[in-house]
Image: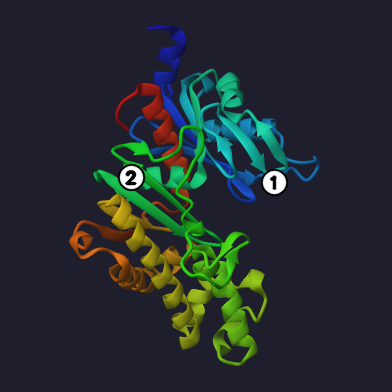
Amino acid sequence: MADNEQDRKSRNVPDKVWVGFDLGGTKMLAVVFDENFQVLGKKRRKTRDKTKDGVHLDRLADTIRMALEDAGADESAVQGIGAGCPGPLDLKKGVILEAPNLGWKNVELKDYFATQFDCPAEICNDVDAGVFGEYAHGAGRGARCVLGVFPGTGIGGGCVYEGKIFRGSTASCMEVGFMQMATEGPAAGVGPVGTLEGLASRLWISAEAAKAVYRGKAPNLAKLAGTDLASIRSGILSKAIEAGDKVIEELVALAAQQVGRAIGSLVNVLAPDIVVVGGGLAEAMPRLYLSETQKGAKRNVLPSLKSCFEIRIAELGDNATVLGAAAWVKQQAKGSGI
């Protein structure tokens, strides 16, 4: 046994680890997993350094090194790094084509991580990574086909089919938020009117809830957040409902039914075993959101497919993307199971 290996074993330092990285949002998260995907260490940091313009790649690498230090693992132990990323991606080349919130265009993140840590690296859409995490170690374990729908500020979606992320040859897909649900109504910022995201996202709920506050119909929400859209988040909506604001409950129920209708249509196309519903709304109000989503799905799914699927609330929370990204790079590196 080599001296350095013997030293690692004596200090109980893991000799093989996998890293999952979540680049979404204002904060980034790096998590170090062992071979069985138990968490060994992690580091969460603000994505931007206020002293610099934009987001620099060395900040990402430093965050991974901090997570490795927290895990007590050497860089040489890293077997692979998987990153869940926002924005349009070139999955074949491992390039983030554009991420406006990061100030990035054509960033070769896959090659950067592979070079920095001398290991295999993969990037994937952050929602795809989250669905793969639920498939590998969460609510979709053991399923042949898992559909994921994640309502939040927007509405993201993904699908894992027979162990593979459902995607195009170079790009991610499953943009369920842009499904057209009506021929008129709100849009999702871009694209046609009457989209699922325009009709059922948390942003739509918050806007309608603010109107209810203004009209005096949601007194509890008025005390919690007033009419400030930025303050009317999933947890606040849940508290207002618990306090007795029926109009807020009706808004959430209506949005969840719209999501269910979209799920029903997707079941007709994909026939998944499990549909995982995640995101802030579902996690803050699991019973209400699940029951109303199920109602909506029953309206649109074909009678012959009603018994082929089950809707479940996501289990992994904030760890879904990092765990899924790490499991994905391990599968790609080993060419087999997870």
Residue at the (51%, 42%) spot, across then down? 125
Asked if one can make out residue 245 in the rendered structure from this viewpoint, the answer is no
Give the secondary structure at mark 1: loop
The residue at the far top in this view is 2
In percent of width and height, residue 315 lies at: 36, 54
Residue 207: quarter of image: bottom right
- Of mark 1 and mark 2, the one earlier in the sequence is 1
Going by the numbered disc 1, the residue's amino acid type is Pro
**Which residue is disc 1 drawn over?**
100
For residue 302, above or below residue 335: below
Residue 257: quarter of image: bottom left
Residue 45: quarter of image: top right
In percent of width and height, residue 220 lies at: 55, 86
Which numbered tag is attached to residue 184?
none
In percent of width and height, residue 93 lies at: 55, 26
Q: How many marks?
A: 2
Crowd around label 1: few <14 · some 14–19 · many ≥20 (10 Å): few
For residue 336, above or below residue 237: above
Going by the numbered disc 2, the residue's amino acid type is Tyr
Q: Identify the image's colour scheme: rainbow, by chain, secondary structure or one colour.
A: rainbow
Name the one closer to the observer, 241 or 42: 241
Residue at the (54%, 17%) spot, across then down? 118
Quarter of the image with the N terminus in it? top left
Quarter of the image with the C terminus in it? top left
**Which residue is disc 2 drawn over?**
135
In percent of width and height, residue 224 lies at: 60, 80
